[in-house]
Amino acid sequence: MTFATTYSYQDRKVFDLETLLEAIRFIIVNSILAFIFLFLMVEELEWAVLSKREGITDNFIDQTSWNINTLI
């Protein structure tokens, strides 16, 4: 006996191709963004270490979105 308000799980495909492709696209795009931000942070850390070791005393204001001081 089936009521009009019930939902049959046999009617719904759980693993369809469209959902799979959307998940793969999401993972790839976020991996590329994570890779870019990783290297931007490595460059920022490298500059901090180099300027500390070389004794560079230049003052600069970094208002960029990948500034490590604002990210942390």
Image (cartoon, helix red, strand yellow):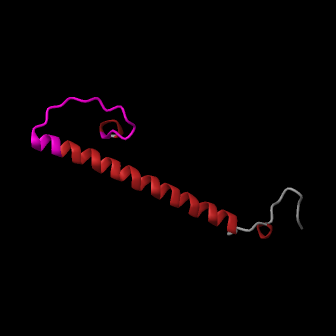
Quarter holding the N terminus? bottom right
Q: Quadrant of residue 26?
A: bottom right
Frontmost residue, 25 versus 23: 25
Q: Position of residue 48 (x, y in %)?
A: 20, 42
Question: Could you tell me how many numbered marks the image carries?
Answer: 0
Q: Is residue 21 left or right of residue 27?
A: right
> Which residues lie in the magenta part?
50-68
Quadrant location of residue 69? top left
* Vertical arrangement, residue 52 with respect to residue 7, above or below: above
Image vertical order of residue 5 relative to residue 49, above or below: below
Q: Residue at x 66, y 63 (%)?
A: 19
**In the rendered view, would you say 28 is above or below 56?**
below
Residue 57 inside the magenta-drawn segment: yes
Task: State the residue in front, 71 or 48.
Answer: 48
Residue at point 37%, 35% (across, down): 64
Question: Which percent across, then down, holds residue 39?
Answer: 34, 52
Residue 30 relative to residue 54: left or right: right
The quadrant of the rendering that contains the C terminus is top left
Predominant SS along the magenta part: loop
Residue drawn at (13%, 36%), measured in percent from left and top?
Answer: 56
Magenta run includes residue 67: yes
Q: Which residue is drawn at 24% across and 46% down?
A: 45
| 16 relative to 4 in the view: left or right | left
